[in-house]
Image: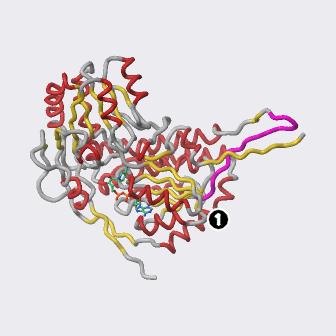
Amino acid sequence: MHRMSFALINPATEERIAELEEAGVEQTDEAVARARAAFEGWRNVAPTDRARLLRRLATLVEEHLEELARIESQNVGKPIGGARAEVGMVAQVFHFYAGAVDKHYGETIPVGGGVDLTFREPLGVVGLIVPWNFPLNIASWKLGPALACGNTVVLKPAELTPLSALRLAELILDAGIPEGVVNVVVGPGRIVGQRLVEHPDVAKIGFTGSTEVGRGVMAGAAATIKRVTLELGGKSANVVFADADLEQAAAAAPYAVFDNAGQDCCARSRILVERSAYDRFGQLLIDATRNVKVGDPQDEATEMGPLISAQHRETVASFVNGEPLFRGETPLGKGFWFPCTLVEASNDDRIAREEVFGPVAALIPFADEADAIRIANDTPYGLSGSIWTENGARALRVARALDAGVLSVNSNSSVRPSTPFGGVKQSGFGRELGMHALDGYSEVKNVFVAT
Ligand code: TXE
């Protein structure tokens, strides 16, 4: 069968960086069959050996950090410094799950007439579907726990950004992980992704992407009662109280939105500010945003690169109508650039309701603590968020009241290898990272033995 080829573009230069052949249903089925064939072997590898192989993979990622960071930077348009940090996290994630292999075990439960045991069994072949914004990172969040639990994998990277996953697949073999345990299939979501969702031999789909496609994945998975973990969109709030360290909050706020050019599911793209501090914070925020260094991703000083594609830039642009509060500068010439943009909004405006996935933040005033909670929760999403206050009791009160899976107080940070990550409401369900992710890649089996 003739296979289509497609070109990959560097979003900062619009240059072609690679040409690949597109896989279809047939290649997807072959990959599932290979993963299926490798499953019995992999699940029976002694836990200490499985841990050793994952640790070796983590070390190989560290040894190839610069190369992987360059690939990611060119393919996604990420600033090189940020790309290095992301690849560093990938290594940490594999280290973490190497350590988790022999720490995730069953129980004995007191019952009458015998002994009752639980086992943590792998699911089988899992399909991992990954987006283009953090290609290698998000792949590792799924691969780590999937492999630690003894599953085999078919990984589908996003069509626009498959290069780092293909290089990782080579490192996985170099680490000594047997052939067939991890299979990478590069092709369109509606063909390869869809086939994984429908395939009767795939036990679970770990999906990160848009809420719209996630809805289809969940519906498609129903036919074979597949397990799904969905990490979807967000419209997270950055809640700034007047009693916060406003300088610190304003200095951090741009990076909570403009990091990865806003193409971040955790972007705190609604900045809620207590009315009594609104003018002062607004000015500090404009000053901080003006300082964000936008430009060549290969330049060590660059903090923000271009958007992923021309098409995506059009979508982002459609959100900004009229004169914004602030619009930054971008390089001229080639590249899918979009400036850092701040707009004043009400929570009912489109800009405050839909995920922009670009460097655009909406500033929204609130009256008091109750009003802040009401506005922050008035969204179909519930992924992340930040709370800025010097009042510790208030920080905890508001953290408990917000509908979100991941919150930070006086910080923007959302992800660490050891802590659970995921959403509530239409941001999805299931947890990645930390020990919690292992629950999504294993099933509890109960065995009663009559004595
Ligand atoms: O996502 P898609 P896209 C949001 C963000 C962005 C928008 C569109 O707002 O602007 O989604 O991005 C695969 N069955 N997020 O179009 O389409 C696809 O090939 C199975 C938020 O890139 O959801 C890719 O591998 N799989 C988000 C993955 O799904 C399918 C991250 C995600 O692509 C499929 C990305 C199908 N029918 C986008 N169709 C976040 N929360 O981080 C596509 N795919």
281 lies above or below 351 = above
Q: How many marks overall?
A: 1
Placement of the C terminus among the 4 image quadrants: top right
Find residue 262 and report its horizontal and vertical position in percent.
27, 46
Residue beneath disc 1:
37
Please identify the quarter of the rendering in which residue 30 is found.
bottom right
Please identify the quarter of the rendering in which residue 353 is found.
top left
Q: Is 145 left or right of 254, judged from the image as shown?
A: right
> SS at mark 1?
helix
The residue drawn where x is 33% and y is 46% is 264
Depth check, front residue: 110 or 373: 373
How is the protein colored in the picture?
secondary structure
Tell me which segment is drawn in magenta: 111-125
Find residue 286 and report its horizontal and vertical position in percent.
15, 34
Depth check, front residue: 134 or 384: 384
Outermost bottom residue: 1
Find residue 308 and report its horizontal and vertical position in percent.
27, 56
The residue drawn where x is 43% and y is 43% is 425
Residue 1 highlighted magenta (yes or no): no
